[in-house]
Image (cartoon, rainbow, N blue to C red):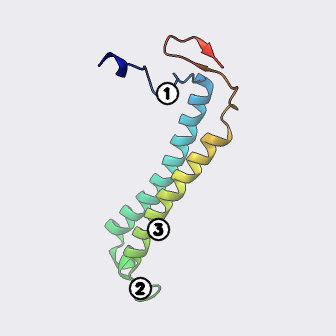
Amino acid sequence: MAALDHGPAHPVEVEDPRVVARHARQGIFLFAAYLLLYAGFVLTSAFMPGWMAVQPWGGVNLAIWYGFGLIVAAGVVALIYSWLCRSHAAPFSGTHRNAAGEEQS
C-alpha cells in the first residue's frame, strides 16, 4: 500500500495578509448590510405586526415577501462577495509551492 502515498492533491496556497484583511473587511461590510435588512424584518415583525399582515401583491402578505427577499438578498450578497474576492485576487504567476514550501513551475 506504499504506492498510495502520493502527497497532497493541491499545492500549498500562499496568501497575502493584505488581501486576506481586505476580503475580511469586505465580508464584514456585506454582513452588516444584510444584518440591517434582517433587523428590519425582526423589528417590523415585533413592533408593527399589522404591517406584516398587509397583502401588497398577489394576495401574499408582506411577511412572506420580506422573507423571500431576505433569501434572495443572501444569495446576492454571496455573489457580490465572491465577485469582490475574485476581481482583486493577484493573477496566477504560473508557479506554486510544493508540500515542502519550495517554489515550482
Mark 3 and mark 1 lie on one chain; the one further toward the N terminus is 1
Q: Residue 85: which numbered mark, if any? A: none
Mark sitting on residue 69: 3
For label 1, the residue is 10
Image side of residue 64 versus residue 104, left or right = left
In-image side of 77 versus 91 (left or right) = left
Dot 1: element: loop
Label 2 is placed on what type of residue? Gln
Mark 3 or 1, which is nearer the eye? 1
Residue found 52% across the figure and 23% down from its top:
11
Question: Is the Cβ of the residue at disc 3 closer than 8 Å to that at disc 1?
Answer: no
Please rate how many residues cluster around mark 2, counting C-alpha atoms within 10 Å: few if below 14, some from 14 to 19, many from 20. Answer: some
Q: CA distance from mark 1 to mark 2?
A: 53 Å
Q: Nearer the viewer, residue 66 or 98?
A: 98
Q: Count the labels in the image.
A: 3
Three-letter amino acid code at disc 3? Gly
